[in-house]
Image: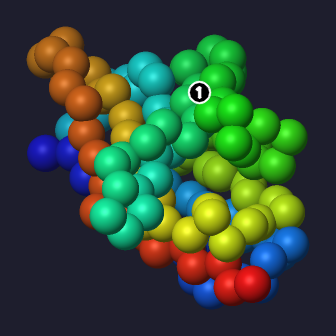
Amino acid sequence: QVQLVESGGGLVQAGGSLRLSCAASGRIFSINAMGWYRQAPGKQRDLVATITRRGTTNYADSVKGRFTISRDNAKNTVYLQTNSLKPEDTAVYYCNAYVITPDYSGMNYWGKGTLVTVSS
């Protein structure tokens, strides 16, 4: 019913930048919070950043000052600008969104992830 599709991942050298995008489609009335999470090999999935519909943001301490989350409500899209990347940022990055469908029910959705690899 609702799909989240991430894009923008890839291989980058330390100090470089990538811009991740996540577009939501399907039976959408509105989207509340959106966010990015990441999971490194052998580790749990951790929060990277979240943004409310009105634009209030929250960041993990490890990415503050380097990553910026933003969204375009008209396009149901959330972005993550990642700068000054470090090898420890290597992970699969997942998009998350709390979607309200036309029947006014709400549910949390996840994308399938996009791989970010930072070489030293």
Q: Is residue 94 above or below residue 118?
A: above
**Left or right: where 73 falls relative to 40:** right
The image quarter in which residue 86 lies: bottom right
The image quarter in which residue 71 lies: top right
Provide residue 72's location: percent of width, then percent of height: 63, 39
* Residue at far front of view: 42
Q: Nearer the viewer, residue 11 or 96?
A: 11
Provide residue 94's location: percent of width, then percent of height: 40, 54
Q: Nearer the viewer, residue 112 or 16?
A: 16
The residue carrying pointer 1 sits among few (fewer than 14), some (14 to 19) or many (20 or more) residues within 10 Å by Cα, namely many
Can I make out residue 5 in this image? no
Identified at 20% across, 26% down, the residue is 107
Kindly identify which residue carries mark 1.
Answer: 51
Identified at 85% across, 63% down, the residue is 84
**Left or right: where 32 falls relative to 62:** left
Secondary structure beneath disc 1?
Answer: strand
**Left or right: where 51 falls relative to 86:** left
**Left or right: where 24 falls relative to 116:** left
